[in-house]
Amino acid sequence: MINNQQVKGDVAESIVVKAAKELKREAWVIRHVRHCRKNSDQDRMGIDVLLFLEGGFCLPLQVKSSARRLQRHHRMHPYIKHVIILEAAELLMHHDPNSDKYRAIKLDLIRQTKLLIQKAVREAFYSLNRINP
């Protein structure tokens, strides 16, 4: 049985994947985007999306539809540092997908998510450069 929380999580993940694919098309440092399947090995390791970057690097992302269980994620998956929280994704559940309001909300969420992904990638490269100067 699918509950409301699962639907919110699926919506949030789809927004992150769409934003990452847009960044890839814009010739940014992302070379490939992989949305990990539910109950896959990656999902059990706390990874929802894998970003394959220039230079052969891979950045795992966890996507949350709320900050409610963020501490639990960090406790269970301490090596998955980059978490994108899209609490506003719930707004999409209350509008007709064919409406202008829905499209406007979705475009805004994608725009905001692109900024969050860019920040996560910059932080990952910065941390990597600090470790290996």
Image (tube, grey):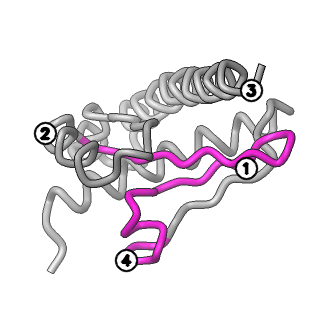
Near mark 1 (Cα within 10 A), the count class, few <14, some 14-19 or many ≥20, is some
Question: Given contact means CB atoms under 8 Å apart, are the residues at marks 1 and 2 in contact?
Answer: no
Q: Which callout, 2 or 3, points to the residue nearer the camera? A: 3
Q: Which residue position is annotated with label 4?
A: 39
Q: Residue at x 46, y 75 (%)?
A: 41
Mark pair 4, 1: CA separation: 21 Å
Seen from the viewer's position, the closer of residues 43 and 16 is 43
Magenta stretch?
A: 37-65
First-in-chain label (4 vs 1): 4
Residue 121's image quarter? top right
Q: For the residue marked with disc 1, what is the amino acid? A: Phe
Label 1, secondary structure: give it: strand
- The picture places residue 15, in percent across and down from the top left corner, at 47, 44
Label 3, secondary structure: give it: loop
Q: Residue at x 68, y 45 (%)?
A: 21
Horizontal side of residue 25 vs 1, given as left or right? right
- The picture places residue 69, in percent across and down from the top left corner, at 16, 44
Quadrant location of the N terminus in the rendered image? bottom left
Label 4, secondary structure: give it: loop
Near mark 4 (Cα within 10 A), the count class, few <14, some 14-19 or many ≥20, is few
Q: For the residue marked with disc 2, what is the amino acid? A: Arg
